[in-house]
Image: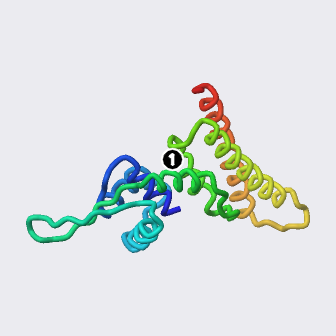
Amino acid sequence: MIEILILYAVLNRELTMYGIQKAIADNFAPYTKPSFGVINPALRRLEKSGFISSRRTFSEGGKQSGFYIITNDGKKELKRLLLEDWTENPIQFFSNASIKIACASVLSKEDISILFEKIKTQALEHKFDAENILNDEYISLTFYQKNVLENTVNEYQNFVLLIENLEKENAGNR
């Protein structure tokens, strides 16, 4: 997911590593807060793969700064990553899906429809799994487990409604 965040951050402007971290925080803080220790190796991987380019300059004080910008291949990679399936792990679902939705403006209307369908399908699968546990008479849930699962079902239902509203908006913008 860090690659999506970095490529999105440098999509329209050249940024330093600090600028990238700030752009990620400004756009995605509710979902993730990557450190320089996560950003720096990801920048190296992206540059080595040709998805970003960098230039080095020296400040008047002699300190070296690196500036990063996305390449044409990086734009293609960003779109590929947005449409790529991700982990089936429910704990990561909301943040990953939210990040992908927040970056959807870089996709075509058709690709946005594909992205929304994938997210909605996975949300419904997670909701179904939670409902099955709630309704399974052979699983003994504590009061707290039951309440958390009921809340989880509601969160997935609300997320599906959000996606359906976004789908309608996307269909209306053609």
Residue 90 percent coordinates (x, y):
68, 61
State the colouring used for the structure image: rainbow
Q: Residue at x 86, y 56 (%)?
A: 135
Q: Residue at x 51, y 40 (%)?
A: 105
In this view, the residue in front, 77 or 138, is 77
Q: Residue at x 43, y 55 (%)?
A: 29
- Horizontal side, residue 133 vs residue 52: left or right: right
Picture layout, residue 61 above or below residue 154: below
The C terminus lies in quadrant: top right
Residue 125 percent coordinates (x, y):
77, 53
In this view, the residue in front, 63 or 159, is 63
Q: Residue at x 72, y 51 (%)?
A: 153
* Quarter of the image where one finds residue 85: bottom right
- Disc 1 residue type? Cys
- Horizontal side, residue 154 vs residue 60: left or right: right
Q: What residue did someone put label 1 on? A: 103
